[in-house]
Structures are given as C-alpha cells and as structure tokens.
Amino acid sequence: EVQLEESGGGFVQPGGSLRLSCAASGFSFRSYAMSWVRQAPGKGLEWVSTISGSGDPAYSADSVKGRFTISRDNSRSTVYLEMHSLRDDDTAVYYCAKDFGRGASNYWGQGTQVTVSS
Amino acid sequence: EIVMTQSPVTLSVSPGERATLSCRASQSVSASLAWYQQSPGQAPRLLIYGASTRATDIPARFSGSGSGTEFTLTISSLQSEDIAVYYCQQYNTWPRSFGQGTKLEIK
C-alpha cells in the first residue's frame, strides 16, 4: 500500500524558514518523480515543485523560485521542501504527491499546514 | 505559463442525472490532462489521466474526453458521494497548472 506522510509544517513569522518532509512507503521510491502542491485557505490547488526520481531535474513555480528548494533522499524514501523568506501568501496546506507516467499525481498525502503570520 | 479555465464555477445536478464539467487550456496540452476530485476536508484524488484514462479503482460512471485545448469530465449518473470540487491539471509543459475548480452540488 502506497503511503505518503508529510511533516514539518507549523507557524512561522514572515521572513522565516521551514523544511517540510514527506516520508514515502509502499513503492519503489527512486523510480518516481515526486511533487509538492499547496492549497491556500478556501482556494484551489497550486502546483509548487516537482523532482525527478534521480533528483535531477527539478522544477518550481515562479511564485516560489529562489525561495523554495525541492530535494530528495532516495536512501530514506523521503522528499523535502526547504522554504525560506516565507510570506503571508505562502500560508496553505502543503500536499506531497507521487507522480507517474508523464506527470499525473496518483497518490497524495494528507497534507501539512503552514501558517505565515506576524 | 498555460492558463487552465474551468466552467462552470458551480454546477447543481440532481441525483442520477448527468454532470458535465469543462476545462479549457490557453494553448495546446495535447492529451496531458488530469482530473482530480477533492471531497471536503480530504486530499485530492486522481480520477482521469491522459485526458481519458480512468485511474485505478475509479468507477465507470466517470469519463474524460478531449485533446488539445478543450476537455470534458462527465459523470454519467450522479451519486451523493460525488459531491466535491473537481480540478483539471495540465502536465504537458512546465510549469504545471491547475484550473480554478468546479464545485459540484446536489440539486
């Protein structure tokens, strides 16, 4: 059974940093790209970042480029999202997702809440 | 960036009736289009990928069609458990992008 468990969310002041983790199990982790998708309160889904199975290449949305970095540790079956210079509009539930084929996400975690506020 | 536009914003359908949701891309995404269902308080669930292929364990009442810039998700006979927000997503070109969602309600 595929499982994705996010952690690392919390409350942070503007300008602060957080590192999200997503621990995966139930599939051959290194064979699949992984993505982060976020959802601000009462809003729709926003794609944030995707990393290939090998770790290179990786892609990010313009809204987070230069502030967020996606990475993975295939030995630990874990994908990370390092977030710096956080802003109020980064407040959201952050979902980790497993990709397959050309890029649809067929498994999702339950999400971790990130709140940026002074 | 490819902009995905969904219509309508809200759709009210009676149980057992057909629901038709639309998604338009600002430029061609070929067949690299997915549909997701998000029930209240839940994570998204993949319904359709490749514009028309049902994901694992998705009921046959869900079907997808289209290619290029125009796509449709059809629920042939609405069930109460289908009440949710539905999102389309293109994965043909970086950055990936989602539509703003269609909220499906019971009439």
Image (cartoon, coloured by chain):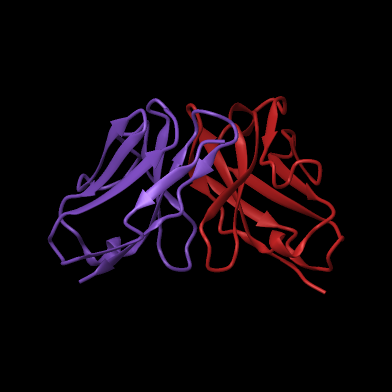
- Residue A61: quarter of image: top right
**Left or right of A70: which side holds A112?**
left
Q: Which chain is purple?
A: B
Question: Where residue A7 sits: x, y (%)?
Answer: 70, 58
- Residue A89: quarter of image: bottom right
Farthest front residue? Answer: B26
B32 or A106: which is nearer to us?
Answer: B32
Question: Where residue A3 sits: x, y (%)?
Answer: 55, 49
Q: Which chain is red?
A: A
Q: Is residue A53 visible?
A: yes
**Left or right of A107: which side holds B106?**
left
Q: Is residue A26 visible?
A: no
| B23 lies above or below A112 | above
Question: Where residue A45 sits: x, y (%)?
Answer: 53, 53
B10 or A32: which is nearer to us?
Answer: B10
Dividing the image into 4 quarters, which one contains the C terminus of chain A?
bottom right
Taking the spot 78% from the left edge, 72% from the top edge, the residue there is A117
| A108 lies above or below B40 | above
**Left or right of A108: which side holds A84?**
right
| B30 lies above or below B58 | above
Taking the spot 65% from the left edge, 28% from the top edge, the residue there is A53
- Residue A59: quarter of image: top right
Question: Where residue A93 sits: x, y (%)?
Answer: 62, 61
